[in-house]
Image: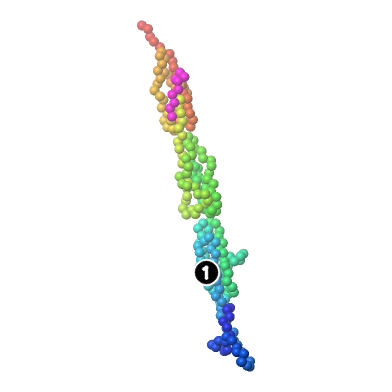
Amino acid sequence: YVFLGWFADEKLTEAVEAISATDTGAKTLYGAWDYAQLTLTFDANGGKAVEAKEFTIQTKDWELPATTKAGYTFAGWFNGENEVKVLNENTESFTVVAKWTPNVYSIKFDVNGVVTTLTQDFGTEIVAPTELVKEGHTFAGWDKEVPATMPVVEDELVITAKWTVNTYVVTFVVDGVETEVEVEFGAKVEAIANPEKANYDFVKWTPALPATMPAEDLEVAAVWKATVYTIT
């Protein structure tokens, strides 16, 4: 309550601010009170601000409003360790602090068709997969930026590995002379033009060339047979 002053009558219409020294005899004064205007302050603790609430001791069953914070679920208002849900004849001003529970979200990483799902609390550190292997290819990053911490994921988030096709070398050896040809992994392997050698016929390359380029360099050598001549 707030003290409003002294009055000479019960109806509190005649205020008495002072009594003269010349006044004599007994007097009855009536004190006047009013409800103190108190304040409930909200500390949203990083969430959406809530306007302070003015109240008096007569305020009853006034429910505290909820608030929001990205990535979290509201867990109530607290005054110290005590949760406060309603104003109910409180006698003094005070502050309540919002408590939050982090939401759980998921990110999927697609590495060459193998999907790894990370399910974590909002704001926790994201560690992307490190086993990044694809035959004949070099990892070239992700198709989306990998967040440092778990974000708010409203729709499915799939982050896919990108790859660069490797290039390998086919070395053709003809009597010690080498000719190198670069071929991408998986591409068709084509031989150079058949070599020529006096008094010999080209037979083949050994080992045999594969139809497509494997994930390694190759070396093949020319095989010859002596030319057969007919004398008539």
Residue lying farthest to the bottom in this orientation: 25
Query: In the image, residue 166 lies at what x, y percent?
Result: 46, 34
Report the residue at 46% width, 41% height from top.
162
Examine the rendered structure and indicate whether residue 208 appears above or below residue 36.
above
Query: In the image, residue 164 lies at what x, y percent?
Result: 45, 37
**Residue 170 vs residue 156, the one in the foreground:** 170
What is the quadrant of residue 12 in the picture?
bottom right
What is the quadrant of residue 22 in the picture?
bottom right
The crowding category of the residue bearing disc 1, from other C-alpha atoms within 10 Å (few below 14, some 14 to 19, many at least 20), is few
Report the residue at 56% width, 64% height from top.
97
Query: In the image, residue 144 lies at what x, y percent?
Result: 46, 46
Residue 189 in view of the camera: yes
What span is in magenta? 174-182
Task: Confirm whether the magenta stretch covers residue 177.
Answer: yes
Query: In the image, residue 119 lies at what x, y percent?
Result: 54, 50
**Residue 162 vs residue 34, the one in the foreground:** 34
Residue 212 in view of the camera: no
> As shown in the figure, which amino acid type bears the numbered disc 1?
Ala
Classify the position of the N terminus by image quarter.
Answer: bottom right
Q: Secondary structure at mark 1?
A: loop
Which residue has dot 1 on it? 52
